[in-house]
Amino acid sequence: MGGCSYSLENMLQSVRDVVKPYILFRDYGVAYDYFVQKGYECIVVPFKLNILPKDFNYLKYPFRYLYDKWYNYKASRKIERLVSLYSIQIIHSNTSVMTIGIETALRCNVKHVWHFREFQDLDFGMKPFCGMKKFRSLMEKSDLNLSISESVQIHWGLDKYPNARVIRNAVMGIDDACYVENKEKYILFCSALLIKTKGVELALRIFAGSQIYKKGYRLVFVGKIVDEVLMSRLYDFIRDNGLKDYVDFVGYKRDLSSYVKNATAFLMCSDNEALGRVTVEAMFWGCPVIAKNSGGSKEFIKHGYNGFLFNNVDDGVSMLSSLVEMDCRQIILNANKTAKDSFSIEGFGSMMVKLYRDLL
């Protein structure tokens, strides 16, 4: 379960009075179980994603291409039968890493919506398996291409497409916004996966440089450890800088609310965050955000008004050192307002329903 899955749930919540959804998964697992437990009708048809690591061995490409094409041909035929069985009017692909949605929509002559939630190359080191020329031709044939930020839209060149829109993720309801006044003395870093591209090392360096641990503050990492080499470097840094008693790794947590609401500050350190769902959650839940001045973050965080933006380690150190000494009440209230105005389920739903109706 990552941001993409939670954003799908919020999207479905926002249109539930109008749309009857069937969720197609390519395998069973945590996300499938989650949506079944939530009461959604879920179907599994195995298919291959349309992505390759940027360092893929191209000697294997022809074999992979033929195998994936055969595999997805069979999957698409099964999906076509489901489209007919359930009288599907719109196929909504929830991420850019699959093309089976648009390919099936074209064969079934139904409308297609494509949600671009990631950069692929900048954030995950991936690229379209079919090649950019083929990928762009499919983007042109999609009835509607949605990007979660201007940065994502420009990255894919969708700002030049008449069938493209920017619509920011729904994250939670307006009434979920809150502010816990008495903060605990810890700084929070959250990511489903603790990987290099999320800026884990940068967060640690900023915390160390601020020296706020001398005032009793801790740095808490929430997320799953998957890169042992990275973690070895982090532990070495922690040991060498005397931070062993001030840094906690608590693992992946499905419910972040208590961690975020009570934190003194939230660090968003990714160089290329498409939007930063957990950043918006922090704004809803009254936690001051210090974010890297890049990607989607810079589009809705206004420095000194509803959060803080930094360009490098020194900037981050200075801001974190200052933040723990200042009264952030007004910044938190401004962040609450930004979140409610731009990322609420209520606002997103009205826009999404209109887009669906316009398509049909």
Image (cartoon, rainbow, N blue to C red):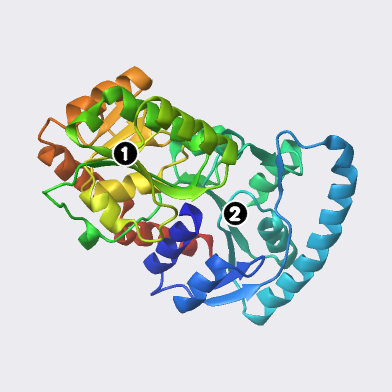
Is 276 displayed left or right of 344 in the figure? right
Mark sitting earlier along the chain (1/2)? 2
> Which kind of residue does numbered mark 2 sit on?
Asp
- Classify mark 1: helix, strand or loop: loop
Is 299 displayed left or right of 318 in the figure? right
The x and y percentages for residue 201 are: 45, 31
Q: Residues within 10 Å of mark 2 (few under 14, many from 20)?
A: many
Look at mark 2 in the image and give the residue it sits on. Answer: 143
Seen as rendered, the residue at the extreme top is 314
Dividing the picture into quadrants, the one containing residue 349 is bottom left
Q: Nearer the viewer, residue 155 or 180?
A: 180
Is 286 displayed left or right of 105 in the figure? left
Look at mark 1 in the image and give the residue it sits on. Answer: 245
> Which kind of residue does numbered mark 1 sit on?
Asp
Against 286, is 298 above or below? Answer: above
Q: Residue at x 30, y 38 (%)?
A: 246
Mark drawn on residue 74: none
Labels 1, 2: front one: 1
The x and y percentages for residue 185 are: 20, 42
